[in-house]
């Protein structure tokens, strides 16, 4: 097999491959021989069809199948021979698919070679904080809010009230997807509806009707983004929030059967300390990734970036509840995060290679056990994890990334910085 490679860009390569005709003919003959033992033709007993007849009937079809297979296999052999790592599938241009040697041209991008820098002595800041009694008080109040009851009242709506409404929205006089709702309960101040919509409900009373105008943000789905809309609203009820007392029943609702409020506070503190440790780790991890990116600017294969953009578009569309392709956010919105993901994938891969890091299966098992413990039947949850290859691969990838972070942290210079639980919990919010 003859191979020639030409660089036509920083990462783009044009490779011409020539495969001897003998390899093609041998593969065709072998496939025809195999077919003759299984094919059924009128007038011949099963397994007794002459190869000559099979060739007459299926020769061209078999040849095309063989050519496709040989192109695929020879391309894989050629990139190994030339020590190239394709970033994606090639564009194949046939040069000769007839009789004689098989010749084709493959155009593709390669994964860039990286000389990892910036690991030794990377400057990192580690947040140091503790869970205070005030933090616990705040969390207990949050738990009370989660168990809040709502009681109908005969007064104007105000912050924290639950207002139930019907509404019909129009843009330029026409209805639009998602613009109509019946018996929609909105807790004022939670920000789950557009700010102008919530603001219009403050001061309303049950039975009141009103029409408001608002402008949709630019990041809304196509058809509504940036447009002005009118909403005809009917207020059906106003309910006041009432928080539960801090008593035994309240504690039991969170699984604390004995020890009352003091035991509940202790369990809350332990959970908050775990969250705090996770937040500290998250900040360190982000600094590690940012440090790798800053020290290692690399050319990125367009193939990989485009694939990541499509993945981010699909993720965003799913979150938004998009119903068809027209509602998928535009690709340009995801260029920067896609480039970051691709760059980090390449850099993390290089760390794994040079550090010879292998996934720690004991950590994978531990992670799954922690997740399973959150379910009513941990054993059943663990069985689900064990029998789901995709979940297992995702967990291995996550653990491997954490091992990469640990490897970098061992070589970094880390200084401590005072912080608070509240500041760390707001990280990334």
Image: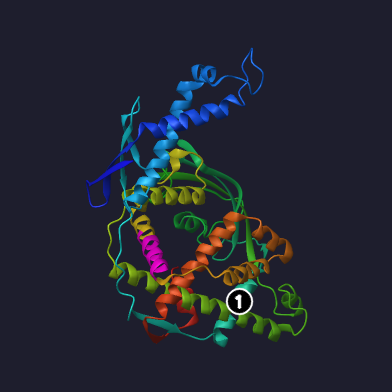
The residues colored magenta run 343-354
Pick out the residue farthest to the top. Answer: 43
In this rendering, position of residue 118 left or right of residue 269:
left
Please name the predominant secondary structure of the magenta segment in the image.
helix
Q: Position of residue 144 (x, y in %)?
A: 64, 73
Q: Secondary structure at mark 1?
A: helix
Front one among 290 and 68? 68
Q: Taking the image as drawn, is residue 291 in sight? A: yes
Residue found at x 48% / y 55%: 200
**How many discs appear?**
1
Picture coordinates of residue 211, whole percent (x, y): 48, 46
The residue labelled by disc 1 is 141
Image point (46%, 70%), residue name: 357
Which quadrant is home to the C terminus?
A: bottom left
Question: Quadrant location of residue 417?
Answer: bottom left
Quadrant where the N terminus lies? Answer: top left
The magenta stretch spans residue 352: yes
Residue 302 is inside the magenta segment = no
Across and down, in percent, residue 343 comes to 35, 60
Residue 3 picture location, percent across and down: 29, 43
Residue at the spot 59% in from the left edge and 82% down from the top edge: 137
Answer above or below: position of 322 versus 418.
above
Up/down of 105 relative to 85, above or below: above
Q: Quadrant of residue 272?
A: bottom right
Foreground: 293 or 236?
293
């Amino acid at each position: 097999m003859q191979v020639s490679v030409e660089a036509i860009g920083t990462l783009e390569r044009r490779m011409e491959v020539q495969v001897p005709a003998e390899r093609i003919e041998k593969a065709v003959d072998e496939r025809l021989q195999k077919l003759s033992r299984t094919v059924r033709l009128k007038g011949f007993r099963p397994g007794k069809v002459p190869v000559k007849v099979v060739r007459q009937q299926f020769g061209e079809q078999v040849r095309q199948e063989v050519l496709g297979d040989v192109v695929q296999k020879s391309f894989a052999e050629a990139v190994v021979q030339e020590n190239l790592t394709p970033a994606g599938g090639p564009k194949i241009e046939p040069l000769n698919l007839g009789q004689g040697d098989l010749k084709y041209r493959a155009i593709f991008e390669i994964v860039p070679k990286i000389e990892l820098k910036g690991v030794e002595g990377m400057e990192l800041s580690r947040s140091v904080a503790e869970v205070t009694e005030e933090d616990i008080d705040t969390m207990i109040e949050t738990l009370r809010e989660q168990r809040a009851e709502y009681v109908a009242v005969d007064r104007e709506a105000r912050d924290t009230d639950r207002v139930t409404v019907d509404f019909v929205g129009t843009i330029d006089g026409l209805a639009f997807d998602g613009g109509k709702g019946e018996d929609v309960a909105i807790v004022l101040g939670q920000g789950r509806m557009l700010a102008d919509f919530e603001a219009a409900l403050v001061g309303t009373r049950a039975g009141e009707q009103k029409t408001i105008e608002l402008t949709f943000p630019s990041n809304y789905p196509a058809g509504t983004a940036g447009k002005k809309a009118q909403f005809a609203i009917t207020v059906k009820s106003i309910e006041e929030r009432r928080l539960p007392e801090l008593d035994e029943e309240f504690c039991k609702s969170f699984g604390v059967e004995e020890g009352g409020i003091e035991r509940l506070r202790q369990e809350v503190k332990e959970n908050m300390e775990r969250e705090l440790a996770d937040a500290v780790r998250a900040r360190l991890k982000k600094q590690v990734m940012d440090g790798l990116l800053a020290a290692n600017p690399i050319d990125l294969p367009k193939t990989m970036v485009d694939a990541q953009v499509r993945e981010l578009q699909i993720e965003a569309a799913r979150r938004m509840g998009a119903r068809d392709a027209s509602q998928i956010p535009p690709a340009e919105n995801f260029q920067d995060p896609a480039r970051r993901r691709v760059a980090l994938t390449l850099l993390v891969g290089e760390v794994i290679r040079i550090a010879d890091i292998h996934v720690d299966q004991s950590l994978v098992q531990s992670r799954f056990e922690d997740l399973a413990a959150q379910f009513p039947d941990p054993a059943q949850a663990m069985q689900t994890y064990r029998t789901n290859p995709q979940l297992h691969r995702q967990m291995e990838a996550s653990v491997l990334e954490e091992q990469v972070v640990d490897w970098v942290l061992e070589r970094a210079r880390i200084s401590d910085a005072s912080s608070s639980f509240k500041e760390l919990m707001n990280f990334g919010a």
